[in-house]
Image: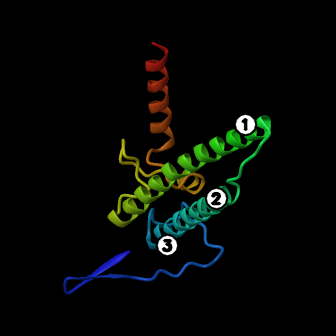
């Protein structure tokens, strides 16, 4: 959350208890809920980036000449799988960054299709969600219909 003070933008610290969980009986996307999801997204991003650093370090360490062709093929398959996983995680980090931008812009938690609030349960399970469950299901049904044509 941000406050304007004589043209200067200041971030206001929001206290969150360690056991805080957003609840349906509080105002939707209040300061505590917004801060809860911001921290959840930042922690998730941090974990992904740390895993990525570990992978790069591991790949540098494991670069070696393997004489057995079957062992080399197995190692290359493992590397390709690891790189695909990292690519998916890179895309996930950009979705996390987009969610953090939506928080800063005050748009987080609202369906990009209907403008309605996305359920807290859905956001807790998938904090990068941009659509309500209903809108997501409609979107997937339309995609399936077009794929099956």
Mark 2, residue position? 60
Q: Nearer the viewer, residue 95 or 27?
A: 95
Mark 1, residue position? 73
**Quadrant position of the C terminus in the picture:** top left
Q: Position of residue 41 (x, y in %)?
A: 52, 63
Name the image colouring.
Answer: rainbow
Q: Residue furthest left?
A: 7
**Kind of element beneath mark 2:** helix
Q: Position of residue 46 (x, y in %)?
A: 56, 66
**Kind of element beneath mark 1:** helix
Q: Residue at x 64, y 47 (%)?
A: 82
Q: Residues within 10 Å of mark 1 (few under 14, many from 20)?
A: few
Q: Which mark is residue 148?
A: none
Q: Nearer the viewer, residue 40 or 63?
A: 63
Please tell me which of labels 3 and 2 falls first in the chain: 3
In the displayed structure image, the side of residue 60 where residue 127 appears, left or right: left
In the displayed structure image, the side of residue 82 where residue 25 appears, left or right: left
Q: Nearer the viewer, residue 23 or 59?
A: 59
Q: Which mark is residue 32?
A: 3
Q: Residue at x 80, y 39 (%)?
A: 68
């Amino acid at each position: 959350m941000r406050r304007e003070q004589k043209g200067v933008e200041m971030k206001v610290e929001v206290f969150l208890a360690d056991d805080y969980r957003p609840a349906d009986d509080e105002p939707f996307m209040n300061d505590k809920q917004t801060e809860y999801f911001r921290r959840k997204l930042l922690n998730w991003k941090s974990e992904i980036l740390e895993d990525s650093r570990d992978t790069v370090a591991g790949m540098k360490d494991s670069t070696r000449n393997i004489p057995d062709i079957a062992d080399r093929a197995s190692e290359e398959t493992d590397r390709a799988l690891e790189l695909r996983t990292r690519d998916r995680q890179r895309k996930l980090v950009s979705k996390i960054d987009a969610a953090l931008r939506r928080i800063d812009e005050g748009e987080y938690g609202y369906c990009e299709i209907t403008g309605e609030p996305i359920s807290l349960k859905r956001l807790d399970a998938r904090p990068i969600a941009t659509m309500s469950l209903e809108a997501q299901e409609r979107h997937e049904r339309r995609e399936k219909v077009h794929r099956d044509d």
